Image (cartoon, rainbow, N blue to C red):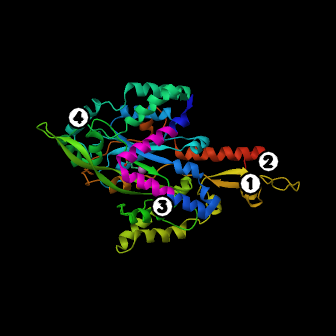
Amino acid sequence: MISQWRLRAAFAARLSDMYGREVPAYTTLVDVSREVNEEVLRARGADAERLGSISRVTAERHGAIRVGTPAELRQVARVFGALGMHPVGFYDLREAASSAVPVVSTAFRPVDGDELARNPFRVFTSMLTPADPRFFDTDLRDRLETFLAARELFPPTLLDLADRAEAEGGLSEQDAEPFLRLAVAAFELSPEPIDRAWYETLEKVSAVAADIGGVRSTHINHLTPRVLDIDELYRRMTERGIEMIDTIQGPPACQGPDLLLRQTSFRALAEPRALRAPDGGVTSGALRVRFGEVEARGIAVTREGRALYDRLLTLVDEQAAQHPGAERTELARALWTEHVPGTERDLAAQGLGYFTYRVTPGRPGDGSRPPQALGDLLDQGWVRAEPIVYEDFLPRSAAGIFQSNLSGEGSRDNERQGAAYDSAWLSGALDREVLDPYALYERQRDHSLAQVARELELDGPPG
Ligand code: OOG
Ligand code: NI
């Protein structure tokens, strides 16, 4: 029996091989990431592995895919369910982006600490919103929904195998091979000619809508390795002549522990695609939709930590508007230095970051009883805190990544009321609960505190 995590690791590795063949610059990105990671490990030793072992980080990837309908999303959820990946978080990119990005999203990922440590592969998954009148009029919506209803993204054999893997916690060796082959193939770029007129109709509204609803299959949009020093990676990619987007999204580079998520990407490349003209003739064209992204992950923040992050982003926006000549990154760095604690200890003390706690091994016993308060346990060396890695995404960054790689702004009519979608709606559409990321981090922290209480025989978890 091949367990779910082995299937997940194999799927991620095969997808990465496939994407490297399709988009060779992605392979450069993976190579440079590995090079930077090895150097950081040499320079910083054990500290470099504070947010994940080097083997986890080296294998770590996230992918991004885009589908058209709730029915397609439910099928995707079955494929990822087979790999032990669950929907976590709701992202409304229609609101986060200024240009036309008519999608709502979630991320499929493992949720248990052990599973994340084995292989944290995650996929940011977006679904088109044809019902949103800000982007689609009734006629276009009808045509789009008819087009989407007629296509099949995942063959029934794949879905049957996926259901079996999910129900039984894995697959036999004999079933694993066809499952993996079909699953990877489902995300390969299709050679089937694209109806050019239809694609262009959608492109006028949104390049994302055309990428999703203009073709009869789906494909991986990008894959993202993890790097331990994203500023250094950005310099090296640029030195190699690969055109990167203008910025690194997320928190600025700062002294102190890494927080949340920093991401950047190289620009979408022109890929040859077969196009069918209205007269039926097929020509070779080029589309720019797929790219490579890289990310550095930091500590997961609490709701309060996240509110601080969002507040600082707004302040950066305001200051940048007041001082048009100023560098955004410099403004951000100054604000962060002023407002964000520079040590793990202060992050924990101010309730801004998530940590797990462990009893310090071999603490010399002087016979005294441990204190009950968490702060005292930490100060007196009874217990140590270890940061929890941020496993999710950031809507502003996601919108930035979408936008920086769009060919045009598209169009949206902000006078109209948008169609409402939220996490509960998405749970209903998926027929699976969309999990709350904060609840997952809290659960990890609370488990560790309960364990500390048991080991030190405290009166309940330390607070
Ligand atoms: C997804 C963009 C979001 C990220 O890392 O924030 C994303 C897409 O382009 O489909 O992948
Ligand atoms: Ni991404």
**Which type of secondary structure does the marked residue at label 4 adopt?**
helix
Residue at the spot of label 2 = 456
From the viewer's perspective, is 154 left or right of 392? left
Amino acid type assigned to the residue bearing label 1 in the image: Val
Q: Marks 1 and 3, Cα distance to the nearest angstrom?
A: 32 Å
Magenta-highlighted residues: 9-34
Q: Residue at x 40, y 67 (%)?
A: 318
> Is 451 in front, or is 339?
451
Amino acid type assigned to the residue bearing label 4 in the image: Asp
Give the position of the N terminus as an image quadrant.
top right
330 vs 107: above or below: below
Q: Residue at x 42, y 28 (%)?
A: 158
- Badge 1 crowding class, 10 Å Cα cut-off, few under 14, some 14 to 19, many 20 or more, is many
Residue at the spot of label 3 = 230
Label 1 with label 2: CB-CB less than 8 Å: yes
First-in-chain label (2 vs 3): 3
Residue at the spot of label 4 = 142
